[in-house]
Amino acid sequence: MRYLAQRIVNENGDLIDLLIKFFTAEVTDPTSFADIQQICIKKTKELNRPYGEQFITLGYLSAFDFHMYVTEKKMGIKGGIPSTIVDIVLNSLTEAHVLHHLPSNLASNSRDIRYKAGGEYCKFLYERHAIYNVLGGWQFIVQRYSQCVFKIVNINSEGDHSIGTGFYYAAGNSEIAKYLIITNRHVIEKASKIEIYSVDDKEVSYEKIIPDTKNDLAYIILKEKLEIETFHLYPEPEVLSDIITIGYPSIPMTAQAYQISHKGEVNSFVETYNKNRFFLFSAKTSSGNSGSPIINNYGMVVGIVAQDFFEQAAFFEKGKPSYYAGIPGVEIINSANELVFGSARI
């Protein structure tokens, strides 16, 4: 139940928007929440529903309250409000800990199943437009963010081409807003020319490239904002948490680089001889995946594909396999703050 079918999410966007705004309002929009409480308490009194006022005052709302509020505010949904979809969405939000139920010692006093916003966790996801990602699952995330992953072509002085990946990121405020594509430093090194292409093969123009000399990171500063979704950075994944990568790996016997998604899990955090921090993950990668975003189930970037930890002699002599390594999101955040945004490390 954790992930809704992609069809349900795509076909019920307006209803899901209303449900999310209604049931998270306590932590995301206090003004709206006060209005919700006022109307729902009024309705529960009119209908003489026992304990309703107390539960609503404590922030516990029901599907019945939602229906009453939407009716009172004349928030019509085309085709009506199917109760089955409401129940599925609320159950999924609860399983994802965006909402939680009444404590068991109080639940028996309510004739309805009641839900309360999940505090700072709920607010965190809401502010980053990630609750839909939690509901929709991996296919929804890939569909939503495929436009945000770019093919980077490195053309050297001899005219040879190599391919890497980068992802769109936007941050700042009214004074220092920046729109950039984040990739690995080694993707853009030794280039006479860099070309950037969207998943639709449209070339993207840029102003300059800022490499990080300490970490294998680079920031391609764009000339203008792109009218697409933007990724958000998440400091670090948890070991054994599920992730996906989206990138442009080389594929034998194909005429061009295609955008490919791989699923895996985080395996461990490690530190190299030169004190750089990485995490290991199991999603398949190959040349061309460098710079790919490593994405968690919230749809946020927890790291960037950096390299294979592989020693050819160790493989042939002892059978030691390669490991895929990513740079954690916190390292990207600190690097970008220093080199692009001119602000403090976290």
Image (tube, rainbow, N blue to C red):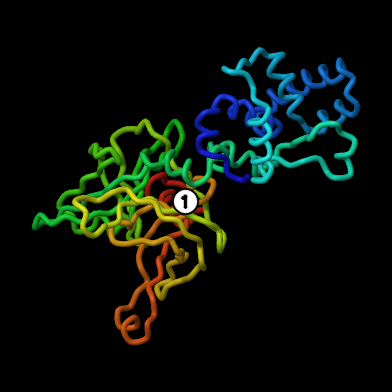
Residue 136 at what x, y percent from top left? 53, 40
Q: Is residue 175 left or right of residue 123?
A: left
- What residue is drawn where x is 63% and y is 31%? 85
Q: Is residue 63 left or right of residue 302?
A: right
Element marked by disc 1: strand
Q: Say which residue label 1 marks.
A: 295
Furthest toward the bottom, the residue is 317
Q: Residues within 10 Å of mark 1 (few under 14, many from 20)?
A: many
- What residue is drawn where x is 53% and y is 44%? 137
Residue 147 at what x, y percent from top left? 36, 39
Residue 311 versus residue 199 in the image, above or below:
below
Quarter-of-image position of residue 240: bottom right
Residue 84 versus residue 188 in the image, above or below:
above
Residue 62 at what x, y percent from top left? 76, 30
Q: Is residue 230 left or right of residue 252?
A: right
- What residue is drawn where x is 38% and y is 58%? 305
Res 115 visible: yes
- What residue is drawn where x is 30% and y is 41%? 199
The one nearer the camera, 346 or 303, is 303
Res 205 visible: no
Looking at the rendered structure, the number of numbered marks drawn on it comes to 1
Quarter-of-image position of residue 252: bottom left
Q: In the rendered structure, which amino acid carries the disc numbered 1?
A: Ile
Figure quadrant of the N terminus: top right
Residue 322 versus residue 165 in the image, above or below:
below
